[in-house]
Image (cartoon, grey):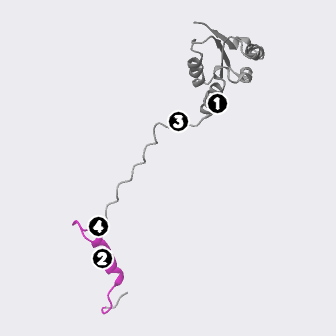
Amino acid sequence: TASPMTPDVGAMATTTTAARHNRGGGSGLGAVAPTPPAVPTPPPPRGLVPLSADFFRVMEAIETTVRADDGRVLESVSSADIVLVGVSRTSKTPLSMYLAQRGYKVANIPIVPDQHGYTARVAAALDSVADTRRIVALTI
């Protein structure tokens, strides 16, 4: 307890703190500053593609299809899900890109006049396809 000569420092601190929190009026000692409103949680970012197994499967299909476009890599024919064969201007490339975006690995082989044994290499590549139902011939 405090003597009459010694001020009660604890009571003074309580009074000063209460006065500091009660600037806008009110009852004085018992007033407490209002609690600030909670900060809302921001919404998740939009437009981001979730990185799932399907995403990586589609990316692999697109990469494989771009590599095998227009008969550039005949070795990839055996691992392709779909093999498109056709003459020029039958829309092999746009169709193969569309199918790749759907997750199919596509090889696209043009039919052209034989140059430097190309026809023999194409025939060997097509023979390496285990299931011939995967080979699709496009016509004009």
> Dot 4: what SS?
loop
Query: What's the distance in space between the residues labelled 3 and 1, CA to CA?
Result: 16 Å
Q: Earlier in the sequence, mark 3 or mark 1?
A: 3
The numbered mark, 2 or 1, whose residue comes first in the sequence reads 2
How packed mark 2 is, by other alpha carbons closer than 10 Å (few <14, some 14-19, many 20 or more), is few
Q: Quadrant of residue 129?
A: top right
* Image spot of residue 91 (x, y percent): 56, 14
Which quadrant would residue 63 be assigned to in this image? Answer: top right
**Dot 3, how many residues are within 10 Å of its Cα: few (below 14), some (14-19), or many (20+)?**
few
Q: Residue at x 64, y 11 (%)?
A: 86
Does 21 appear in magenta?
yes
Residues under labels 4 and 2: Cα distance? Answer: 12 Å
* Residue located beneath label 3 in the image: 49
Q: Amino acid at mark 4?
A: Ala
Q: Which residue is mark 1?
A: 60
Closer to the chain start, of discs 4 and 2, is: 2
Mark 2 touches mark 3? (CB < 8 Å): no
The secondary element bearing badge 2 is classed as helix
**Do labels 2 and 1 touch, CB within 8 Å?**
no
Q: Which residue is mark 4?
A: 31
